[in-house]
Amino acid sequence: MSTAAVKTASPAQGTSPTPRPPAPTSSLGDRSHFSNQRFQNLPIASRLKRNIKHEFLTEVQGERRYLPALNGKDLLVQAKTGTGKTIGFLLPAIENVIRTPTKPKGTPILILSPTRELAQQISEEAQTLLAQTDFRVITVTGGTSNPVKDLQRFLESRHDIVVATPGRLHDYFTGPRKYEAYAKFDGLQTLVLDEVDRLLDGGFARELDGVINMLPKTRRQNLFFSATISDNIKKVAKKYNHGSEYTFISTLKEDEMNVHQHVHQSYIIEPFENHIPTLLALLHLDTIKHPLPHITTTTPSLSPSVTGPQTLSKVMVFFPTARHVSFATEILSSESIQKFLPPVLEIHSRKSQSARTKAAEAFKNAQSAILLSSDVAARGIDFPGVTLVIQIGLPSSAEQYVHRLGRTARAGAKGQGIIILDPQEQPFLTSRDMQKTTTITPYISSPSSHEAKTLATYTETYAQHVQNVLKTLATNNPTVIGAAYVAFLGYYKGQNKTLKWNPERLVEEANQYAKVVMGWSDALPPPVAPKTVGMMGLRGVRGLNVVKPPQK
Ligand SMILES: Nc1ncnc2c1ncn2[C@@H]1O[C@H](COP(=O)(O)OP(=O)(O)OP(=O)(O)O)[C@@H](O)[C@H]1O
């Protein structure tokens, strides 16, 4: 069990750790982040307790985390992925409202989340906790079919908890009914920023400022949560905490790595062109590694079964961009490959919200499936039973690596992580941020090992299948290749810190990628519109095929 470090930005607010008896044991993978506190013994309303399906609080929910939140303190809280941070902020926020003698005017709890899916999930968790109470929860996000009706529903009924993405709430705060929207938060008691480092990392600055500046200036409690909190975020968080100090709480020990010890993590270094065949081999091997309980054979086989693989394998695969996901989906869902694998689903920002929701629901409920994803599902999303997380290509940061990996081994379950990188991307693994974060070992311990040979055999066989699919893809769907090519240019341009590619080199790499990875066979590389070239800062760079799109 870890002795949690409680650090405080304002010494007066600190709480000192006291030794505790050992955590309860279980047949699950790891119980080290559980406390000995039972929910039943918490000093909270019984109508809240009866809806909690868990027995023991996790460390981040545990007494020393919980009480400062209940006492109204402003907290910045760090705890590993999948350790129950959602209940960690929901429970004290709700209990504080219950304890308020006068019914609050307006909405007392506002929770902001970086993605729609996470907002939805937090709302569902809140609704579960509040079943059979008169508390009302609303989710405010983009991507819905009738925004006008959404706004009306938001303004014209009472809500105790609003769970929102900053973008859509900002729309409400700047739209024609903005004064009514501000008034909804008169009497706000608690502001939660979930995935606070993502919300504060710059991408959301305009919307976040626009929302937080319009909240009432009266005293409220701020609860900021994430698995990854850098020193910089600690500084920025102060700005959003009325410019004043907060208590920083971490369940990580001093110098403890930020990922779960029980997740086996490994890396594979292969040139870009081998990434998809290697991925397919790993997916296939995971189906064998996790047979259904009544299946006894574990002999690897490359002949498809009529019913699909009999397996509990459930894998999330992360790619650098949405366009990479679309390209990979084309390959994996082609008939000749899909028959060897569990059902393939995709989720990314280029999909409609209804398709995103459908894919997330299907994966959540699946016993076995493969979800190909961009970073939209990297943080916070709680899919049960994920056996393996595979990351292809450079993650945008060490933090993002941690969050993606955190989709497996949740709530003490077992899990595995593999990252596949091109040799040029390998410096990512030895970067300072990664070294501080995690210990990662080669997937193949020795080239002559049994596992190396098995992986090589599967990769080779899948490489043949991929070549065949690519032949038809370039003819039937060149736009998916063109879009992934442009996405490669855009994404890898931003990875200069690791790759040190100048613009010419970047274009050369992208052109090569189009050819050898995606089967682009024209003499010229895929076309790029002049506007896109300008936006990427690549005007005049040799090797691009700059083509004006046809006039509509
Ligand atoms: N006390 C508990 N005992 C057992 N399971 C729990 C407990 N609290 C939460 N869980 C379960 O653990 C899973 C992860 O919880 P949650 O999504 O809140 O984690 P998180 O710390 O917010 O993760 P992330 O960092 O990825 O956002 C959920 O399925 C949740 O129902």
Image (cartoon, rainbow, N blue to C red):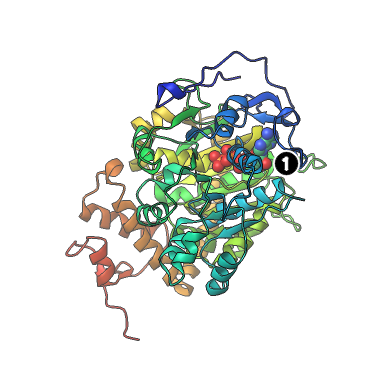
Q: Residue furthest left?
A: 540
Residue at screen point 50% across, 39% down: 225
Say if disc 1 is inside 8 Å of ligand 1.
Answer: no
- In the image shown, does 336 or 266 lie closer to the viewer? 266
Residue at screen point 52% across, 46% down: 379
Residue 279: image location, x then y, percent: 53, 48
- Which residue has dot 1 on it? 48
**Residue 93 in the image: above or below residue 373:** above
The quarter of the picture where the C terminus appears is bottom left
**Residue 248 in the image: above or below residue 339:** above
Relative horizontal placement of residue 175, taking residue 510 as reference (left or right): right
* Tag 1 secondary structure: helix
Q: Residue furthest bottom?
A: 552
Say which quarter of the image contains residue 409. Answer: top right
- In the image shown, does 182 or 28 lie closer to the viewer? 182
Residue at screen point 79% across, 39% down: 296
Relative horizontal placement of residue 436, taking residue 46 as reference (left or right): left
Residue 439: image location, x then y, percent: 47, 27
Q: Amino acid at mark 1?
A: Leu
- In the image shown, does 69 or 410 lie closer to the viewer? 69
How crowded pointer 1 is (Cα within 10 Å; few <14, some 14-19, many 20+) is rated as some
Counting the numbered discs, the total is 1
Let me know if residue 300 appears in the view: no
Say which quarter of the image contains residue 174. Answer: bottom left
Residue at screen point 57% across, 54% down: 105
Q: Residue furthest front?
A: 102
Residue 326: image location, x then y, percent: 49, 62
Residue 525: image location, x then y, percent: 31, 66
The quarter of the picture where the N terminus appears is top right
Let me know if residue 274 appears in the view: yes
Q: Quadrant of ligand 1?
A: top right
